[in-house]
Amino acid sequence: MRVWVLGSGSAGNAVVVESAGTRIIIDAGFPVRELAKRLLAIGVSGDSIEGAIVTHEHTDHVRGVCAAARRWKWDVYASTGTIAGYPLLKDICARPFAAGATLELGDISVHTVRTPHDGTEPVAVLATARSSGARAGIVYDLGHVPPSYRKTFERLDILVLESNHDEGMLRAGPYPPSVQARIGGSYGHLSNRRAGMFARDCTHAGLAQLVLAHLSERCNDPRIALSSMRDALARTDFRGAMSAASQGATCGPFLAGRAHSVWGAGQLSLEL
Ligand SMILES: [Zn+2]
Ligand SMILES: [Zn+2]
């Protein structure tokens, strides 16, 4: 399995997941011209992507999806609530699902998980490669981490996790109190501290890649987010690589598979 983050933050999010010839994209929050540029940068052609999953209707996740679906003939999937919240998705015949559903897209099984966020029916995604068993979690835009996530996102190879803001920087930052309350509230965005608590809960020796995502440009800094996460994981068995996705540039591919099949003897034939 390979995962790329095409960019992440309040101005746009998109994540490409590939396994055994299947490519999907989670969110398409950039204008289609920008998406095309970023796909070119990672050497992936838009028409090689077969499906797009929209996590929720906020502009930074949905902006380019309709134009991209028309241009590259993507099948688009979104929760019923997300389609209600962004009716343009009906024009491209987006296929509705209920948060909690699992979608089968070629080699990739996409399990959706309801997130506590101020969208209509937002979801996080657990992508599992059917051929190799590799698992990637894409977990962003959530105000807190529900207790059930620890089990849902166990034994991941790759975790793309929101680490939106430093709580002190949010309090001291430029936003008025109402916006601060929205961002820091339990249906807003995950702080560095809360991201660290969740990563500590679900980390294991096989977690190869931890990618911090959706960093605020005003109330966070990649060095602060990474250092906070390093502290949180200091006494765990996490031995993987850690990085912070940025708004302006792509990152990846992050690899999962053969080299990291440490958790089960039944999975020794894992492939990249
Ligand atoms: Zn967002
Ligand atoms: Zn959002």
Image (cartoon, rainbow, N blue to C red):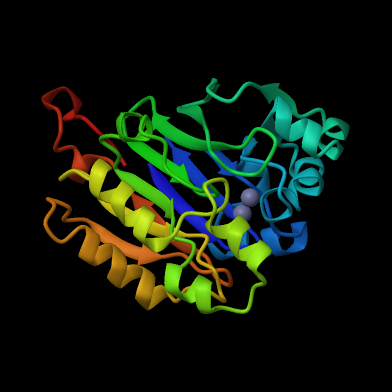
Along the horizontal axis of the image, is 48 left or right of 146? right
Along the horizontal axis of the image, is 122 left or right of 80? left
Quarter the N terminus occupies: top left
- Asked if 115 appears above or below 183 in the picture, the reply is above
Nearest the camera: 242 or 69? Answer: 242
Nearest the camera: 74 or 31? Answer: 31
Q: Is residue 151 visible?
A: yes
The quarter of the picture where residue 129 lies is top left
Quarter the C terminus occupies: top left
- Asked if 175 appears above or below 161 in the picture, the reply is below
Q: What x and y, as percent, mark residue 189?
A: 53, 54
Q: What x and y, as percent, mark residue 258?
A: 22, 40
Q: What x and y, as percent, mark residue 49?
A: 61, 41
- Asked if 52 appears above or below 46 in the picture, the reply is above
Along the horizontal axis of the image, is 181 left or right of 19? right
The quarter of the picture where residue 243 lies is bottom left
Nearest the camera: 1 or 27? Answer: 27
Along the horizontal axis of the image, is 62 left or right of 154? right
Q: Is residue 166 visible?
A: no
Q: Residue at x 52, y 71 (%)?
A: 170
Q: What x and y, as percent, mark residue 63?
A: 76, 53
Q: Residue at x 42, y 51 (%)?
A: 160
**Image-quarter location of ligand 1:** bottom right
Q: Residue furthest front?
A: 177
- Asked if 106 appears above or below 85 in the picture, the reply is above
Instruction: Give the mark count.
Output: 0
Q: Residue at x 20, y 57 (%)?
A: 233
